[in-house]
Image (cartoon, rainbow, N blue to C red):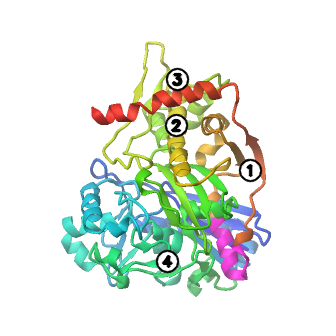
């Protein structure tokens, strides 16, 4: 048996997997995000640990026999979070999250002073990444910066609590901007640009390699007969790729979580910094990937849900009998945007509101707007040399068939829908745990059973192509305003 743990932005998820990589059970625990100032986004690192405790205790109560047989644990988590620890491994401040925009000015300064962020790091310096967050702390909280002994990513702080070891994996660490992505190793010049050294960083392993063992007292607490191996694991998107079998070059998935991601696996490091494509290491050895990332996917729907005081599922249920794009257009830039604009200051909006506009039209506009933003990502990935004809859908938003129909039609690709798309990252983490414990070859990770495959609707493609062309004019107009 194997366990996958995923530290998401809104919840901790745990999945229990058998030796045939079939899910046996799952559990989750809610997480809160703090926004103390406009554009800021933080989380208490210890809330992740409380979520881990709750989910594993839940699994232990419901499945004691299976928990006793666990041999491997894999970890996944939201990327880029700056978790700053003192010499006693205590958090010095709340973790600055991936969707925090406070470090925009630091990004400009770092790119100017160290151009190798764009070459060795392979990515634009964006406020979401870890390096500019540390530079912000260095400039604005010098007393805290002086006490920093280790910088860990969210899942690696959980690993520290599980094993006592400071360890990171290649895929998650690539999102710090301190990694030489092609060499899969820390870059001393990039670390030095933010006043850090290798001593501040965890030891690196591949995602499918062992990164420690569970503390014996925790194994006993959760009813395990042996201390399982804890795998290197991966950033949430690389782990999701392992969960859906997207480990061979050309395989791809679309994630509709808090953020939206279009992910393509590559056999080499393939950056495209001009269009803000993310080029990172994969969680499996000798493999890389590209991502187009939008900051507000289900976050856009959840925002509308809060405003209208209706559940998100009820809003998507209002959009039925799809006959074409919404008459209202929505820009999903609630907290800025990454691909392709790299613009932390841009904000969203609706266009085309009329007396007859109701809740269904607003919900439809949000679904369309997120799909159009993903189409922007597809254009950036195509310019970087990737070819995408088929994607697997994961994340909470993949429960909406209508949304997936819109995405398939806008992107012009077939969307495969797994039977359970909400535990993709946790499932992939569990698979990496099996690889570390048993020597299972991660290159053979297979796709999960499908509930459906959705092809583009040929009767709607022309109308959606026209709507997308008009939608693309909105960003430059908003930017000028």
Q: Is residue 360 above or below residue 65?
A: above
Q: Are marks 4 and 2 in contact (CB under 8 Å)?
A: no
First-in-chain label (3 vs 2): 3
Q: Quadrant of the N terminus?
A: bottom right
Q: Look at the numbered disc 4 and give the secondary structure of its residue.
A: loop
Q: Quadrant of the C terminus?
A: top left
Tag 4 residue: 183
Horizontal side of residue 115 vs 434, given as left or right: left
Q: Is residue 44 magenta?
A: no
What is the distance, in whole Å, between disc 4 and disc 2 at their CAs? 34 Å
Q: Which residues are magenta?
A: 428-442
Q: Look at the numbered disc 2 and give the secondary structure of its residue.
A: helix
Residue 138 position, x and y percent, is: 23, 70
Tag 1 residue: 419
What is the distance, in whole Å, between disc 4 and disc 3 at their CAs? 49 Å
Mark 1 crowd level (few <14, some 14–19, many ≥20, 10 Å Cα): few
Q: Quadrant of residue 229?
A: bottom right
Mark 2 crowd level (few <14, some 14–19, many ≥20, 10 Å Cα): many
Tag 3 residue: 361
**Residue in the image at 41% along x and 28% along y:** 350
**Residue in the image at 77% along x and 46% along y:** 451
Horizontal side of residue 14 vs 152, given as left or right: right
Mark 3 crowd level (few <14, some 14–19, many ≥20, 10 Å Cα): many
Q: Are marks 4 and 3 in contact (CB under 8 Å)?
A: no
């Amino acid at each position: 048996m194997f366990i996958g743990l995923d530290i998401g932005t809104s919840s901790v998820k745990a999945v229990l997997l058998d030796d045939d990589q079939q899910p046996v059970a799952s559990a989750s625990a809610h997480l809160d995000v703090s926004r103390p100032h406009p554009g800021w986004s933080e989380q208490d690192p210890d809330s992740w640990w409380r979520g881990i405790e709750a989910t594993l205790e839940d699994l232990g109560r419901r499945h004691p026999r299976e928990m006793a047989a666990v041999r491997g644990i894999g970890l996944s988590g939201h990327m880029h979070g700056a978790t700053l620890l003192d010499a006693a491994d205590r958090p010095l401040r709340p973790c600055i999250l991936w969707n925090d925009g406070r470090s925009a000015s630091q990004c400009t300064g770092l790119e100017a002073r160290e151009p190798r962020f764009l070459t060795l790091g392979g990515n634009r310096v964006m406020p979401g990444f870890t390096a500019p967050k540390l530079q912000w702390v260095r400039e604005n909280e010098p007393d805290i910066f002086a006490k920093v002994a280790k910088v860990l990513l969210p899942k690696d702080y959980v690993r520290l609590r599980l094993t006592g070891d400071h360890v990171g994996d290649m895929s998650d660490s690539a999102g710090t901007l301190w990694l030489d992505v092609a060499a899969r190793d820390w870059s001393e010049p990039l670390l030095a640009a933010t006043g850090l050294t290798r001593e501040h960083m965890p030891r690196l392993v591949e995602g499918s390699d062992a990164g420690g063992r569970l503390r014996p007292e925790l194994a006993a607490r959760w009813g395990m007969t042996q201390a399982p191996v804890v795998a290197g694991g991966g950033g949430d998107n690389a782990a999701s790729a392992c969960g859906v079998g997207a480990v061979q070059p050309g395989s791809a998935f679309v994630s509709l979580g808090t953020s939206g991601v279009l992910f393509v696996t590559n056999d080499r490091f393939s950056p495209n910094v001009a269009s803000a494509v993310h080029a990172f290491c994969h969680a499996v050895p000798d493999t890389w990937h590209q991502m187009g990332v939008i900051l507000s996917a289900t976050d856009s729907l959840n925002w509308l849900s809060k405003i209208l005081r209706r559940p998100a599922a009820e809003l998507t249920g209002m959009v039925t009998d799809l006959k074409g794009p919404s008459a209202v257009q929505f820009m999903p830039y609630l907290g800025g945007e990454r691909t392709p604009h790299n613009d932390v200051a841009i904000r969203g909006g609706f266009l085309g509101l009329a007396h007859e506009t109701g809740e269904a039209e607003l919900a439809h506009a949000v679904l369309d707007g997120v799909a159009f933003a993903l189409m922007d990502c597809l254009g950036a990935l195509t310019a970087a040399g990737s070819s995408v004809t088929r994607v697997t859908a994961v994340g909470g938003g993949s429960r909406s068939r209508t949304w997936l129909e819109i995405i398939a039609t806008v992107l012009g690709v077939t969307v495969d829908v797994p039977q359970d798309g909400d535990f993709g990252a946790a499932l992939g983490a569990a698979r990496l745990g099996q690889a570390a414990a048993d020597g299972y070859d991660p290159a053979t990770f297979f796709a999960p059973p499908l509930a459906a495959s959705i092809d583009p609707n040929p009767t709607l493609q022309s109308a959606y192509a026209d709507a997308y062309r008009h939608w693309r004019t909105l960003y430059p107009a908003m930017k000028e305003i």
